[in-house]
Image (cartoon, grey):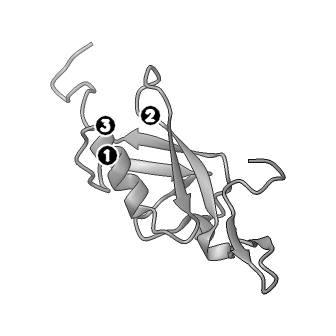
Amino acid sequence: MGFGLRNRTLSSNMAGVVVPVAESSSSRRINIIISGIYRCEADVCFRIKIDTPLRKLINAYCELKNLHYDSSTIYFIYNRTHIKPENTSQELGIEDGSEIHVMMIQTGGGYGRSHKM
């Protein structure tokens, strides 16, 4: 479509002329990029409403990557802030095109007390 009317709701006035309706701030959608746990993974892009709890995004990402979400082992980070499932992108100031990083907590892997160097 032309004239910048793509992705907008249209209505007609009393004369039957079609006019664009401005999006309300609560129905505004943004694109969020999630960079994966491993560097070799491709980034995933989600489009959500700004007032939607990020729980939906977290669950969709974990389902896509076949992960079991547990807030104590998988962290979703935006701007050095740990994202909680009840947060919204509006609360955290996440803007269109922003990137969220996913991290897994690793326990163990170091030398034990009995190991001598």
Q: Earlier in the sequence, mark 2 or mark 1?
A: 2
Task: Work out how far the residue at label 3 is from the one at label 1, CA to CA, in angstroms.
Answer: 5 Å
Asked which secondary structure carries label 3, the reply is loop
Task: Identify which residue is drawn at 70% across, 75% down.
Answer: 11
Side of 70 where 39 appears, left or right: right
Location of the C terminus by quadrant is top left
Q: Give the foreground label among 2 and 3.
A: 3
Which residue carries the number 2 mark?
36
Q: Nearer the viewer, residue 97 or 101?
A: 97
Element at badge 1? helix
Q: Residues within 10 Å of mark 3 (few under 14, many from 20)?
A: few
Q: Give the residue type that dot 3 points to.
A: Lys
Q: Are marks 3 and 1 in contact (CB under 8 Å)?
A: yes
**Residue 53 image position (x, y, % from top left):** 45, 68
Camera-side residue of 114 and 25: 25
Q: Which mark is residue 62?
A: 1
Q: Are marks 2 and 3 in contact (CB under 8 Å)?
A: yes
Residue 32 higher or lower than 38, as above or below: below
In this image, 16 relative to 57: left or right? right
Q: Nearer the N terminus, badge 2 or badge 3? A: 2
